[in-house]
Amino acid sequence: MVSTVHAASRISEVSNDACNTMRQQGVLQKDAPVTCAQLRIVHFSYLDFDGKLRDDGEIMVMAAAAEHVQAIFDTLLKRKFAIAGARLMDHYHGDDLAAMRDNNTSAFNDRRITNGNAPSLHAYGLAIDINPIQNPYLQFEADGKAVYSPTAGSKYANRLSIRPGKPARKGMAEEVVDVFAEHGFLIWGGNWDAPIDYQHFQVSRPLAERLAALPVTQARAVFNAYVERYRSCVLSRKDQNRIAAQATCATSVERGSP
C-alpha cells in the first residue's frame, strides 16, 4: 500500500472537439439542460483497489461546482479511498449500465432519470456516481425481491463496515458521505428508501435548475454561497452528533433556512 500520496489535479474547459465527440457518442443531446461552455473536466489522481497511485482520473461536472469536485477527489486521495477507475462517459457511449458494470466513477451524462422522463441530475453535471459495484443501485420488484445494478453489486448487500471474521472492504460510499456534503453534494442515494442508490451523490433539482440558468461566474458564486451556508450550519451545531448535524443542516440549507 502506498504510504504517502500527493494530489495532482487540475480543471480544464471542454474543447469544441470534445463537445462534438460527446454529441457523436450520445453523451450530449440537442435538448441538454447545460451547454459545453457550462461544463468542466476535473483531472485527478487516485488510489486503485491494488493500492496503486493512478493519474488518469477524469470526471465532467458543471463548471459552477468544478473546484469543489476537484477538492472532493483530492480529499479522497488523501484519505486513501480506493477508486476502481474514472473515465468520461464518451468511453461508454453514454451507456450508464455499461459504465456501472465496469465499476466506473462518473458524473455528466445527458440522460433521463431511471424509469422516468425528467433529466437526470447527471444531465446537469451535478450528480456523481462512485464505485458502482461496491455501491450498487438497488430497486425492488412487486414481490419485494431486490434487484442490483450492476449485478456484481449484490456482494455488497451487507453495508456494515465491520463484519466479524471477514476482511475490510474498500471503496464503499458510507466512508465519504461527509466529504461530498462538505462540498455541496448534500443528497446521497444511500439514504433513499426505494430505490436505494449507494453510488450516487447529487445536489437538489431546484438548485441544479437555478445554476443552469445562470452564466458560469454567477452560478459559481451561488454554489459557493450554498456550500458556505451548509458549512456554517454544521459549525453552529457542535453540540450535536456529527451525523445528526449534517442531516439537519442539509435539510435546512435545501429549504433555504439559515
Image: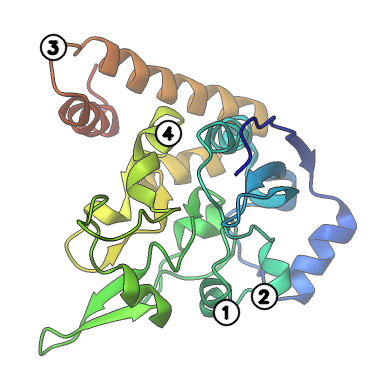
**Res 98 label:** 1
Label 4 vs 1, first from the N-terminus: 1
Which numbered disc, 4 or 2, marks the residue closer to the eye? 4
Q: For the residues marked 3 and 1, what is the alpha-carbon distance in whole angstroms?
A: 45 Å
Element at label 2: helix
Q: Is residue 83 above or below residue 74?
A: below
> What amino acid is at disc 1?
Ala
Q: Name the kind of residue labelled 4 in the image.
A: Val
Instruction: Provide the secondary structure element on which disc 4 rests.
Output: helix
Question: Dot 4 surroundings within 10 Å: few (below 14), some, or many (20 or more)?
Answer: some
| SS assignment at label 3 | loop
Q: Position of residue 67 (x, y in %)?
A: 62, 30
Q: Quickly name the residue at label 2.
A: 92
Q: Amino acid at mark 3?
A: Asp
Total labels drawn = 4
- Residue occupying the point 53% across, 50% down: 82
Is residue 221 shown to the viewer in this render?
yes
Q: Residue furthest left?
A: 143
Q: Residues within 10 Å of mark 2 (few under 14, many from 20)?
A: some
For the residues marked 3 and 2, what is the alpha-carbon distance in whole angstroms?
A: 46 Å
According to the image, label 3 marks what residue? Answer: 239
Measure the alpha-carbon separation of dots 2 and 1.
Answer: 6 Å
| Mark 3 neighbour density, 10 Å: few (under 14) some (14–19) many (20 or more) | few
Circle 2/circle 1 CB separation < 8 Å: yes
Tell me which residue sits at (48%, 52%) in the image. 127
At 51% from the left and 79% from the top, the residue drawn is: 97
Mark found first going from the N terminus, 4 or 2? 2
Q: Residue furthest right?
A: 17
Q: Which one is nearer the viewer's eye here, 139 or 44?
A: 44
Numbered tag placed on residue 179 in the rendering: 4
